[in-house]
Image (cartoon, helix red, strand yellow):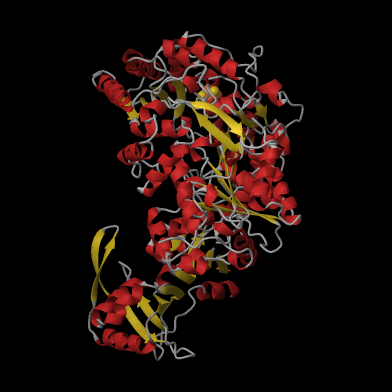
Amino acid sequence: MRLRYAKRGRLRFASHRDFQRALERALRRADVPMAYSAGFSPHPKISYANAAPTGTASEAEFFEIGLAQMCDPDDVRLRLDAALPPGLDIVDVVIARTSDFAERLQASRWRIELPGLTPAEAEVAVAALLAAEEVIVERMTKNGLRTFDVRGALCAARVMPTADGGAACAILTVVLRQATPAVRPDDVLAALRSVAPSPVLTGWHTPPPLVTREMQGPLAETGSADGFALGDPLAADREADQT
Amino acid sequence: MDMPRGYPDAMSAASVFPALEALLPRIQKPIQYVGGEVNAVVGDWDAAEVRWALMYPDAYEVGAPNQGVQILYEVLNEQPGVLCERTYAVWPDLEALMREHAVPQFTVDAHRPVGAFDLFGISFSTELGYTNMLTALDLAGIGILAVERGESDPIVVAGGHAAFNPEPIADFIDAAVLGDGEEAVLRLTDIVRDWKREGRPGGRAGLLQLIAASGVAYVPSLYDVEYLEDGRIRRVVPRQSGIPWRVAKHTLMDLDEWPYPKAPLVPLAETVHERMSVEIFRGCTRGCRFCQAGMITRPVRERSKAGIAAMVANGLQATGYEEVGLLSLSSADHSEIAEVTTYLADCYEGSQTSLSLPSTRVDAFNIDLANELSRNGRRSGLTFAPEGGSERMRRVINKQVTEEDLIRTVATAYAAGWRQVKLYFMCGLPTETDEDVLQIARMAAEVIRVGREVSGRRDIRCTVSIGGFVPKPHTPFQWAAQLDHETTDARLAKLRDAIRSNREYGKSIGFRYHDGKPGTIEGLLSRGDRRVGRVILQAWRDGARFDGWSEHFDFDRWSMAVHTALADEPVDLDWYTTRERDHAEVLPWDHLDSGLDREWLWEDWQDSVGEHGVEDCRWTPCFDCGVCDQLGTSIQVGPTDLGLPDVGHPEVRVGSPG
Ligand code: SF4
């Protein structure tokens, strides 16, 4: 079974490990008949895809579970969602009918709110980033200091129009291609800072940006005009189920 | 900066989360501050007549699993018109940001400012949490000193084991509850509710008088402490009539009527106990003389077999935990424990649910239980606590285990397939010499020798874990001199060398010890009087936080604080710690009644020095410790006629469906 969940509000501060523990317990409370791995200390069969970083909200996280018996996807969605704390919400469940799910998670669309920055200032920085051929940033990872080419992973970026002109808060939407190692929204911010150094940009850490993964899925085949359209990665399973 | 003071009743309770949220991306492990635990309750503020904030004064990862707080949280929230939320100590990274941005101490449930509640209860398992209380009071904008508090500030109530001598924190708290909290918090709630309904007669002072006069809690500000010239206490007297001379502890008699927590909290953040716990009994009558927990929680009150089975089944269903701990001071001592473990092992056989029984009893029975509970094959390690290194020391502390018992027990464990055995000891016990402690090295070597023989393997191990002994109030050792930390450390170093130098067996013996300095400060805080409050305040001002964590504890800061704060007094650190007290001395906690007869404790202290033991009073005639007649309580042990449900009963069968 493939499941999509959202990480919202204060629970965006849950790390991926926190979510894993909460999920395993919720599966037990909800009496979902899990399949267990064989061996000395059996554990439930669950696999996760590209978890959003701690502190980042998401509307499109995915994982797969192995079941010991067939279940109705809607029933699992309701029971599991009720067993998880509010803020960790199961939004979609399908029966896994296809094998290339991981390949369909080609890119993510992120919404980045930057309080303290005006849309006009953001425009300048985004234009500079898009104009560059390559923008390298460094980040400390578990495996030491790594470098990332942000421009290379970036499919699209734009400053969203805001109703009141958004004097106090610019909102960016960016689409990043899935890569190893993954380029993250904070890398995009670092890149923007490096291409458009401005005194205003240094203020970005107070208050901190609010980042939300809006969608994760296949890049549109035809290449839509602006490159922002992402497909639903669960659609193929749903279709296969109906035929 | 100074925190805003006092929160007027209405507007005050708004969530501080928006302000906090901006700080969370900048600190370590923000998840610990957001709440949202499974089974947490967010009550209706406006509908509540009495509002409690409860704190465990340590980091969330330690505090969230605390049973005492979870029990009271649920007991209070079940009451109509009562609301209870939790708060924990914030780490220094967040503390600094909260000060910078004027965010007050908040509850994790609805992120309300602690200063807006009627009562602020703090549960102390250890004295090393005192400085964290001061941080919380300060961040909450509640006066640190009780005398500075305004009409709208919460009533600050201390509870937990350390509250049996609340004198060192007497200046910071408004009241202290001794003993079991369940009924006590309900009675306090009633008093506060009535007082509010009647239009708060007498204001805050009037309320404190009501509390003191009821005997529910001890109100230190209503007692005067008079001192002798040499620094000892002359007497402790109530300041007005109607205030009791002595305040007694609370004892819950029927555990089956209090099956709490019914729905244990399941935190999102990782904590020190990733399991749920069921308390199978309270109290302990083994009478180990160093053990404050055993002394102050008498008499033994068992939960019935059926009560335990139901709590395990319901708790697993409510939490989704995979592990259940059967909790108590000495779990193998439940009179029906064999039946309970066999039953539970049958219920959960073949499921993913595992059971654990924290018990350190040195006997074969304990191993039978452990074997039963690890049927599914997970045999990690077993722990035994002989506590004293030599036969003589064990007589002094009344831990009635012979070396022969120990070796035989450990051999049985290795033969049954356990590979790893932990042995717990204490250093610095009364009358102890180097020789007593060095015997541990010999005993550990013998354990390995016999273990290799019976198991036929060389990869078996034992770990010796040893820490400094701290004399505690309400125990026979309350009069004893604490060993100074220099001698403690030197003795432990000799033991380490003795273990390491054993060529044949040394490599199979692990050695873990705690240095003596934190124990000295713990000793000061445990047996201190009101003057020690000045030391706590000074140390806190100098930056003391999280003193239970070795990376935060700073001995020099504390000894400087003792120096500064007690400069004008005839007493010092040694006076409080390494000094033996005599029979006539008034102890700071003598007016607090733990149910133990002072003369009985004294005789037991004398017997101890004379190396005489006493038996467990559950199975042998009463030794007149005083608990049962003074408190009108009695020992509650099985057999219970309440039977266990069928193993396959659907209510009980939880875990993975195959
Ligand atoms: S067995 Fe001894 S050490 Fe353990 S709780 Fe009882 S009295 Fe305390």
Identify the residue at horizontal 39%, vertical 72% (top origin).
Answer: A208
| Left-right relation of B471 to B574 | right
Q: Quadrant of residue B642?
A: top right
Q: Where is residue A142 drawn, in percent x and y?
A: 30, 57
**Is B434 placed above or below A239 here?**
above
Q: Quadrant of residue B157?
A: top right
Residue projecting furthest to the front: B229
| Left-right relation of B96 to B279 | left
Identify the residue at horizontal 55%, vertical 76% (top origin).
Answer: A239
Residue B106 shows up from this direction: yes
Identify the residue at horizontal 56%, vertical 33% (top origin).
Answer: B164
Q: How many numbered markers are drawn?
A: 0
Q: Where is residue A28 drawn, in percent x and y?
A: 59, 52
| Left-right relation of B180 to A39 | right
- In this orientation, which residue lies closer to the viewer: A241 or B60? B60
Residue B646 shows up from this direction: no
Q: Where is residue B81 drawn, in percent x and y?
A: 73, 56
- In this orientation, which residue lies closer to the viewer: B444 or B239? B239
Q: Quadrant of residue B40?
A: bottom right
- In this orientation, which residue lies closer to the viewer: B589 or B116? B589
| Left-right relation of B467 to B62 | left
Q: Where is residue B591 drawn, in percent x and y?
A: 59, 29
Identify the image quadrant of the N terminus of chain B.
bottom left
